[in-house]
Image (cartoon, grey):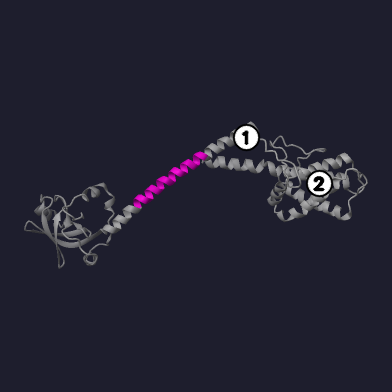
Amino acid sequence: MRVIHCFIRVLTLYLTMSGPALAGCSALMHSIELAEQNFSMGKAHSAASLRELNQTIHEINNDDVLLVLRGTGQASAFGDLRNFLTQLKFISEAANRDTFQFSPRMQQDLGRAREIVDTACDHRAGTSVQSGSVATDHHRGYQSPRDHSLGLGSQRKPMLSPAQQAFLEESFNLNLLARLIAGVVLAVALVLFVHYSLVLVQVLRRNRRICQVPAEFICMMNAVPGNVTVLGRHGCVFLPASPDDAQTIEGVTTGTYCTLHIQDTAMTAKLLCDVSTDCRILFTEPISKQLMKTLLIHSEKPVRYDFSVMKGRSRTLRKFGIGSMPPA
């Protein structure tokens, strides 16, 4: 939450104190005011004022002007405004022509330029122009940028107060921390994704199913009825039907060979571990997928995949086996 809050503060700071946009408004509005002072009908102008107008237009950055216009959906007016400023700069260079007056067309263009600039700049920092020069907005900590867009000048970087610089540095550090945390989270997520993907592949390969298939387990001359609760291609788990049946084979040790009957199918197997409440059986030969599918048809409960391979005990049992026979 703190990172999000700081991001919002940085974004707000950028939008409200954007140096290039405000500087563009400042120079534009000052140029329009000087033009109105010098060339409106019935008004006289001076060489000094014309030189100031020329210098002001000289400092206008085309990129800043386009940024200002885009902010109010007036990007299409950029060409008209730029052409007017170019003409105005050319006229203002003739500083000794004290009797020059705008033509009616130029007066219309001046009015149109005033509308465009007022619309673009009223919602930003207001008029930051002072009579006689291009004002520097000390409250927002920048100076008017200049470039070579209209012919001209070099650009100065926005100036920030120490408090603003400290805030931006803190925001940068928080942003860096957020990226590091996000990177760690993504790395952990990737590791978990790969791990569980491999587990899923193993489960699908082993094809073990949880079920309840009636069966008969014959071991040490004892026939015990019960159910196969887990069935795979390499083995199964057999659960005696009652505690009395379980006592019949209780204590039979690991590796003892036995026979498992399911319907008309008999499978030779051996015990994977000592018999307790259930019997974990390893087939001497893996059964086919078709036979496994046929046996599962007799299940009295819905058949589903067995994910117990994810448990530590199952991983230990997988290590058991004789020769090339894999575990259940």
What's the amino acid at mark 2?
Ile
Residue 54 rendering spot, x and y as whole percentages: 82, 43
Compare residues 242 and 310 and report the one nearer the observer: 310
With 301 as the anchor, is 195 left or right in this view? right
Identify the image quadrant of residue 13.
top right
Q: Name the residue: 52% across, 38% down.
A: 174
What's the amino acid at mark 1?
Gln
What segment carries the magenta color? 176-196
Q: Residues within 10 Å of mark 1 (few under 14, many from 20)?
A: some
Q: CA distance from mark 2 to mark 1?
A: 32 Å
Q: Name the residue: 65% across, 33% down.
A: 161
Q: Is residue 20 above or below residue 213?
A: above
Mark 2 sits on what residue? 32
Residue 312 rendering spot, x and y as whole percentages: 26, 47
Residue 193 in the magenta stretch? The answer is yes
Q: Is residue 239 above or below residue 100?
A: below
